[in-house]
Image (spheres, helix red, strand yellow):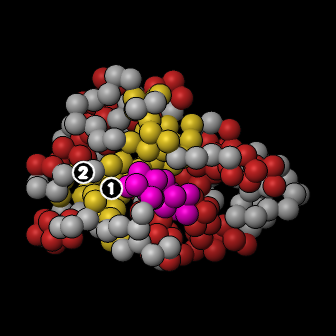
Amino acid sequence: MVEVWAGLADLLLPAGCAGCRARHVPLRHGVCAACAAQLSTLRPRSVRPTPAPIGLPPCVALGEYDGALREMLLSYKERGRHGLARPLGTLLADVVAVATGGAPDGVLLIPVPATARAARTRHGDHLWRLARHATGSLRRAGWPALLARPLRALPRPDSATLDSAGRAAAAAGAFRIRAGRLGALRRAAVGRRVVVLDDIVTTGATLAAVSALLAGAGVPVDRAALIAATRRRTGPA
């Protein structure tokens, strides 16, 4: 119910462009024409942190964590613009499609879960909202996509305050498979490519930790699909 009211507030309250914060300009999907044009030039590409943590799967991101894409993500995550979940989810679906080869195929999407504290602060699990829209977009395009929520996140420090070593230490052991979900998860993964979803990759520590946990449970991860990758740590895979 909290997410419903948050979404209604985003639709009803006047807001500027999510990409450049310009006021009193026509908006489509939360952004002005100039920012929409900037976003339309982005193409999913392989990215990889340097150095990459052991166990990090191949990663594909829509673009660098910069410009209109960065501002759009910040508006969605930190400024309460929950209505942006739909366009961002559509963009994430495009990344999944490229990451898995472009041909409609069976995929199992597993989003990195938010901690309880982060979910309270952001009025819900922001990545789960994106993942639902991404799954719907893929299905409308003919992909037999499944969405699973088998993981839970344990309390951990805010990664924004940590360096690469700190992020790796915090990520190790920060996730668990929910009780009673393992059997269904293994069945869902049969014959499907397993794709872990996240919004931003910086050091890759979180994605490596989640992938190791899933692999240890008998569900190896094929790819990771991201909205953005930080410029200072990524480059061609």
Image point 32% across, 55% down: which residue?
A: 195
Q: Residue at x 41, y 51 (%)?
A: 99
As drawn, 206 above or below 28: above
Q: Quadrant of residue 113?
A: bottom left
Up-down: is 112 above or below 149?
above
Instruction: Identify the image quadrant of the C terminus.
Output: top left
> Residue 188 sits in which quadrant?
bottom left
Question: What residue sits right under mark 1 in the picture?
Answer: 195
Q: Which residue is label 2 attached to?
A: 221
Tell me the crowding category of disc 1: few under 14, some 14 to 19, or many 20 or more residues within 10 angstroms, Cα based: many
Give the SS element for disc 2: loop
Image x and y of residue 233, in percent: 46, 25
Residue 61 x/y as whole percent: 48, 44
- Note whether residue 85 is visible: no
Q: Are marks 2 and 1 in contact (CB under 8 Å)?
A: yes
Residue 144 visible in the shown view? yes
Q: Is the magenta stretch mostly helix, strand or loop?
A: helix
Give the residue type at disc 1: Val
162 vs 227, left or right, is left
Please state which of residues 224 and 117 is positioned toward the viewer in this rendering. 224
Classify residue 233 as left or right of residue 177: right
Q: Which residue is drawn at 25% across and 47% down?
A: 210
Is residue 49 covered in magenta?
no
**Could you tell me the amino acid type at mark 2?**
Val
| Among the two numbered marks 2 and 1 on one chain, the one whose residue lies closer to the N terminus | 1
Numbered mark located on residue 163 in the image: none
Helix, strand or loop for disc 1? strand
Horizontally, residue 41 falls left or right of residue 173, namely: right
Mark 2, residues whose alpha carbon is within 10 Å: few (<14), some, or many (≥20)? many
Q: Give the range drawn in magenta.
A: 89-102
In the rendered image, which quarter is residue 50 located in? top left
Residue 93 is one of the magenta-drawn residues: yes
